[in-house]
Amino acid sequence: MTIIRNGRVHEQAKTDHPYLETFLTSNAASSVRLSPEADLHKLAPHLARLNTIEIEFPGFADGRGFSIARQLRRQFQYKGDLIASGPLIPDQYSFALQCGFDAVKVDTLTFEQQSEAEWRAALDDFQISYQKGYTAVNGPAQNVFAARAAKRAASLPQKYIGLSAQAALERALKFDFKGEIVLASSMGVDSAVLLHMVSKIDKNLPVLFLETGKHFGETLAFRDLLIKTLGLTNVQNIKPDDIDLAKEDPDGLLNQIDKDACCDLRKVRPLAAHIRKFKVQITGRKRFQTPDRAHIEILEVGSDQIKLNPLAHWRAKDITGYMHKHDLPPHPLLTFGFTSIGCAPCTTKVKDGEDPRAGRWRSSDKTECGIHFIDGKWVRTNQPPTTFGDYI
């Protein structure tokens, strides 16, 4: 059996999951296989100990498995791995992902009659659906009814509700904010996703990179690789003011004395001087990241600068899936345990089980660099962002 994730052959299935009745008699099993007739109410009390559920499809024309997947995700709030198993075809792949599946398992003979390329291509074949998608490799797909509502919407933010990340960017860059929009990028672990999307629309979009003078060499090399790979033609390296550097940090050790002051000198002020020239800023904010971001919309107005959050509804595995699908290079330091990467003196590796940002300003109360815009003013803060200023 062959398992397909993110449009690729990810692994060969080596173990069989027990059917529901067998699972219910076991106290150790952490996976289960469901037939289309399975009673989910019997399974519900045991969902917390499950990390994998495989749902059988007797034939590609039998859609009961899709309904089971949506029930597990929406009604029962199952968060683990969900695999569709059976003679599915590439045309059904996007639909499976929208219903909540993480992968599709097909027998090797069936897969040989298709191809990995067909499964990958299928992800781009359907840009709109009749249901609100649970997820998809390119983020939540646009729903037919959301699209219609967006066209009838009176306010600009409402016109972006339901749009996929790519559709939101295309609308903003080509129509609503053409020539008035900017992307500030840290060239961090997630940055390649938005940069890739932008490169498909406008390779000359202004992209601001804060050259603090304290970056890892790997980050600078990663920046150069992304510029070359994606063909970006307008990446601007923003540096701190030389006079301010000589006055406030002559020996380059300010980060050891006052981390907030160092961020203010090398990040906040340099970026503020450039980014306020634009009407709109593209951010990489996502709802899952912090409680303050749990309800952000794709387009946010009401501040001095409009925020476009194309990835608002994405999850961590949507990011990973997109990078795999488009063969985007990972940040070189990710392999070594750096899951959130800032300046070298203030970034350490993250241990298993730690928060992804635990390596930033370790052993201090500081959690953010301070690039925020609140009530029309640039401020320094140790608190998570609330309304503005994310450096992705």
Image (spheres, rainbow, N blue to C red):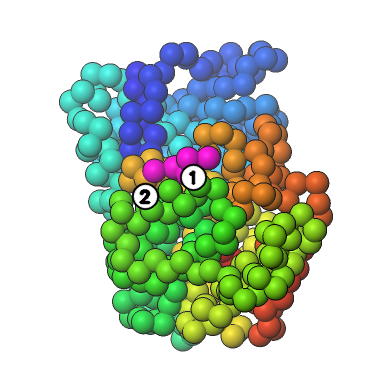
Whether residue 264 appears in this view of the structure is no
Magenta-colored span: 329-333
Query: In the picture shown, does residue 273 fall above or below 166?
Result: below
Q: Quadrant of the N terminus?
A: top left
Residue 359 counted in the magenta span: no
* Residue under label 1: 218
Residue sitting farthest toward the left: 113
Contact between marks 1 and 2 (CB within 8 A): the answer is no
* Residue under label 2: 225
Whether residue 51 appears in this view of the structure is yes
Residue nearest the observer in this picture, 18 or 335:
335
* Relative to 219, 171 lies left or right: left
Q: Quadrant of the C terminus?
A: bottom right
Q: Amino acid at mark 2?
A: Leu
Q: Amino acid at mark 1?
A: Glu
* Relative to 384, 40 lies left or right: left
Residue 331 counted in the magenta span: yes
Residue at screen point 56% across, 34% down = 336
Residue at screen point 31% across, 76% down = 174
- Marks 1 and 2, the one that precedes in the sequence: 1
Residue at screen point 25% across, 51% down = 125
Give the x, y percent position of residue 237: 46, 66
Classify mark 2: helix, strand or loop. helix
